[in-house]
Image: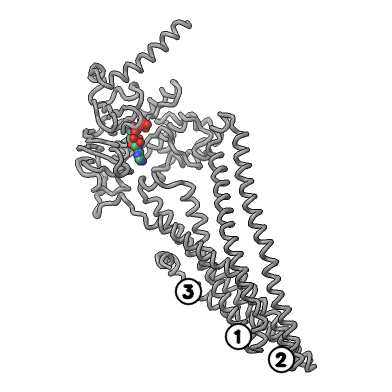
Amino acid sequence: METFKKLKQYYWPYKRYFFLSLFSLFFVVLTTVAYPIVMQITVDDIIREENYGLVPVLSLVFIGIMIVKSISTFFHQYMGDYFGISTVFNLRDSLYKKLQSLSFHYYDNAKTGDLMSRLTADVELFRFFLSFGFSELVRITLLVLGSLSVMFYYSVPLALVTMASMPFLIVVVRKFDQRVHPAFRKIRKSFGRLNTRVQENVSGMNTVKSLSREDFEIDRFADKGDNYRQHYLNTATIWSKYFPLMEFIGNICVVSLLGFGGYLVMTGAIDVGVIVAYFTLIWYLVGPLMNFGFVINNFSQSKAAGERLLEILESEDEIKNASEPVNPQGVKGHVTFNDVTLTYVENDDQALKNISFDAPPGKTIGLIGATGSGKTSITQLITRFYEPEQGELLLDGRPIEDYSLKEMRKHIGFVLQEPFLFSTSIKDNIAYGNPEASMDDIIDAAKRAQAHDFIMAMPDGYDTLLGERGMGLSGGQKQRISIARAILINPKVLVLDDATSAVDMETEFKIQKALKEVMKGRTTFIIAHRISSLKHSDEILVLEDGAIVERGLHEQLLNNGGPYQRIYDIQYQDKEAILGENKQHA
Ligand SMILES: Nc1ncnc2c1ncn2[C@@H]1O[C@H](COP(=O)(O)OP(=O)(O)OP(=O)(O)O)[C@@H](O)[C@H]1O
């Protein structure tokens, strides 16, 4: 119940619809139970008494009851669904908002598939219980109580005898539930695995095809498909075994009714119409009992789903806005690190150790070092994607925590090695960080990013729709779109993450030209593996295991006898070797 209490703020605003639905349900049950009573009156007071003059009256009463039943069923269903759907709309919105505010730390540990299933399947399970499960529980209770009251009212002995086999039914239903729930859980798990296979296959289609693993993938999928089929068949077996058994027990009740009821009619203890009414009333008990397990299961599932949703909603936003955030408008982009240390995972090794540097506005800082040396970590601290463990990080001389998080991030642009493009038009992708930009601004940014020509060569120009993750564009083209995106937000600080590592010479030349354009007047951090990409920097920081081991200008570092010179020598020797080979071929 704790879970439902915690989620109250999402469904309580719609309580009116819930109570209206329950109110209508009361009439649904009342008219349902009235049906066998009408049958009894028809048999005993009209047919047996040959009171045929009452037929039109009773018919009208019956029609009246059915009209009330139809109207109340409509309201019961509509209001119930309205309640569930509105709650879930509210809930999904809050979950999505929460996901936007959660820190990178959260996403480091989260799994995409799991988050997706929480936002879809778990939310749906919760809705199903609110819309249907709870009122079904109430309906079952009311119907059983109502039917039992009518049965006992007609004849206590007949009610007792007819229900003598009900305990068996309860035992069978319990057994059925115990077997069918684990079987259902297995089906859902198996379906999850099947989905993961499809998702991974589609996402990794490049790898599959390039390594010619199609047959292997087909076999793997067939395996998962077969597993799913097997679980479904097992469940079908359980259903097919238990349902006839449940119906059989229901029919034993009918046999008892006919035997003992017939005897009571013969002795004159009851009228024959009572037996007719009992015929329907019995199934009003058997049906709900068979359903009861399903509803209880739905309740426990929705409780579990609610818990999974609460896990997201109650996660701490580790990186918070200052209580009185400063608007960074007018910042010049002066970045300072004072003795900064970063640890990603508690008790793990430090990813950054005592990092200090000063990047005055408009200057360029080059970051170089082996993989895992901490280059990206430095840039992720500038945007406050993570918080340092110790030390001070200043933007224009002020701690970055003082600034409004959202506004501050607008002043920092990223050009990543693998830029993420959305499956919308090229125009929208360029304007993603600045949706108010005019078409002229977009075209201007694209021209400066050397992207205008290839965009215009596309069939729909700037309106060309991109596939998922920018499918249909080459790596170099994606990068230039991302450079145009950065130009358009006009940031004061720019991070270029190995922007030219995976392109050919001609594209590199174009990208370098575009980068020069975007770097003008901005403090720039260049992360690179190749010395050629950062040798013009105003300061180069050489990183090793999270610490700065060397710093200075290219020319100074070249003759320092340190790691920078080693990197240079290796890259230079490679170049020499290639040039030498080329000469030989010539
Ligand atoms: N989100 C994270 N959670 C835990 N550890 C991390 C995380 N990101 C990076 N690390 C660790 O921090 C260290 C520095 O990583 P970082 O990505 O900054 O290196 P890098 O120099 O940018 O490497 P590369 O050149 O391969 O991009 C590595 O040991 C890495 O495993």
User: Closer to the observer: label 2 or label 3?
Assistant: 2
- The picture quadrant for ligand 1 comes to top left
Q: Which mark is residue 16?
A: 3
The Cα–Cα distance between marks 1 and 3, rounded to whole angstroms, is 30 Å
Would you say the residues marked 1 and 3 are in contact, meaning their CB atoms lie under 8 Å apart?
A: no
Q: Which mark is residue 270?
A: 2
The residue type indicated by label 1 comes to: Ser
Give how far across and how far down residue 251 sits, in percent: 71, 74
Q: Is residue 579 left or right of residue 19?
A: left
Image quarter in which the N terminus is found:
bottom left
| Quarter of the rendering containing residue 509 | top left
Q: Secondary structure at mark 2?
A: loop
Mark positioned earlier in the residue sequence (2 or 3):
3
> Compared to 175, does 259 lie above or below?
below
Q: Badge 2: few (under 14), some or many (20 or more) residues near its Cα, within 10 Å?
A: some
Pick the front one: 402 or 88: 88
The Cα–Cα distance between marks 2 and 3, rounded to whole angstroms, is 45 Å
